[in-house]
Image (cartoon, rainbow, N blue to C red):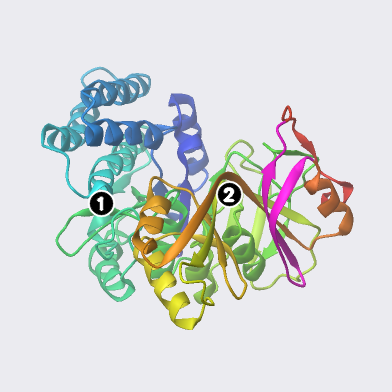
Amino acid sequence: MSDQIRVFKFGGSSLRDAENVKNVASILKRYANEKIFIVVSAMGKTTNALETVVEAHANQTGKAFELLEEVKRSHYQLAAELFPENHDVFNTINDSFVEIEWVIEEEPHENYDYSYDQIVSVGELVSSRIVHAYLNEVDLPTQWLDARDVILTDDIFREGWVQWKETQQRADQVAKPMLEKEGFIITQGFIGSTTENFTTTLGREGSDYTAAIFSFCLDAVDMSIWKDVPGVLTADPRIFDNVVKLDRLSYKEAIEMTYYGAKVIHPKTIKPLQNKSIPLFVKSFIDPEASGTFISSEVEDNYPAMVAVERDQALMLISTRDFSFVAEHHMSFLFREIANRRLQVNLMQNTAISFAVCVNDIDDKVDQFADSIKDAFKVIIDRNLELITVRHYTPEVLESLKRGKIVLVEERTKNTVQMVVKHVPVIRRKANVPTDLR
């Protein structure tokens, strides 16, 4: 067995049902003689389902337990298709969900984000328990690791920031000794813990980032993200036709595209890999033999036009109430409030008398921000917008993307155009990507 460590991440779509779990096992059998560190997401749409439990509990609708039962039932059903009756895994699943029951039996916590992390994190814990049990069931010896024992974050719930020094120390103490044994190791994406041992999450879709954290801390030889697409594409195939796969990407280009909203990789994933020159593969779990996309430093920067679309955007137009210029001390205050609420700024533009900022419209964070500055600033909020980012744009591509839309804000640099747009109310159709994207 090779001593080199490879990190594999499997997302929710690759684990959405029993057949897909079996497919993951068949992929891993190809690597039975290698040291594979596996990171898994919650199964299918479990995170979305658990979010409804959080909302029901916070709003005291009386439906939290009923919604949780649906989530439990789907996991028991999936497990029943993988394991014989009375297998120990059923008790393990039950024990994991009891953690949620303890939370929703109590009055809602004053901090919604705290409750969110304690409840939604169970999706990854259950998923990893099921996959762990199944891999051992099919003679692929696998150890289970609680990611919270390694990844330490600050105490900002739902957007925990990794404390790298302590996380490296924990990886050395907890994870590395496990690598001395034969077989695989499996852990959970998305989650960490505070110094007080409260569960935190790393931000939505954060399992890619978890895999990168472990890749960095364990000095992995490479990392692979297994997706339901053939690799990194020039645009989202759910929105555009005629997209093509990029065979190779530089770290720099991957960072740019994920920052601007490309969904195939979590935005924080690339930097830890780049810091140690760890190559990243984006591969298809549908076609495991295919080459996928290779991301590293040793790639020439020569690309076609690439499009990323971020939906559910809010554009805030901020101006002073005393009609004074928006000066440096104003900006300092605004950015401090933005940071306090972990708002993700996707675009900003300022004039002498106003400041426009486009952010992800998640929960009530935008309203909280507007409320926190209302004494000094007037805020106009435009919602249900899209942010379209085009890397390596051409005039033809931009013209095509603007059709049927009102452009509210536009920013251009040498290689990138960003547009905050509102759709003209017409029947939506799947767009045809211009030939420049092919």
Q: Looking at the image, do the residues carrying marks 2 and 1 touch, with CB atoms under 8 Å apart?
A: no
- Number of numbered callouts drawn: 2
Q: Residue at x 24, y 27 (%)?
A: 64
Locate residue 340, reporting x and y percent. 34, 65
- In this image, 350 relative to 375: left or right? right
* Mark 2 / mark 1, whichever is N-terminal: 1
Magenta stretch contains residue 371: no
Nearest to the observer: residue 113 or residue 103: 113
Magenta stretch contains residue 421: yes
Q: Residue under circle 1?
A: 146
Q: Residue at x 47, y 54 (%)?
A: 208
Q: Amino acid at mark 2?
A: Lys
Does residue 355 sit above or below 190 in this rendering? below
Determine the CA span between mark 2 and mark 1.
26 Å
- Name the secondary structure under disc 1: loop
**Residue 2 seen in the figure:** no
Does residue 35 sit above or below 64 in this rendering? below
Q: Residue under circle 2?
A: 263
Nearest to the observer: residue 258 or residue 360: 360
Locate residue 129, reporting x and y percent. 29, 38
- Name the secondary structure under disc 2: loop
Does residue 97 sit above or below 32 in this rendering? above
- Give the class, few, some or many, for how many residues have Cα within 10 Å of label 2's Cα (few <14, many ≥20): some
Nearest to the observer: residue 380 or residue 415: 380
Nearest to the observer: residue 368 or residue 303: 368
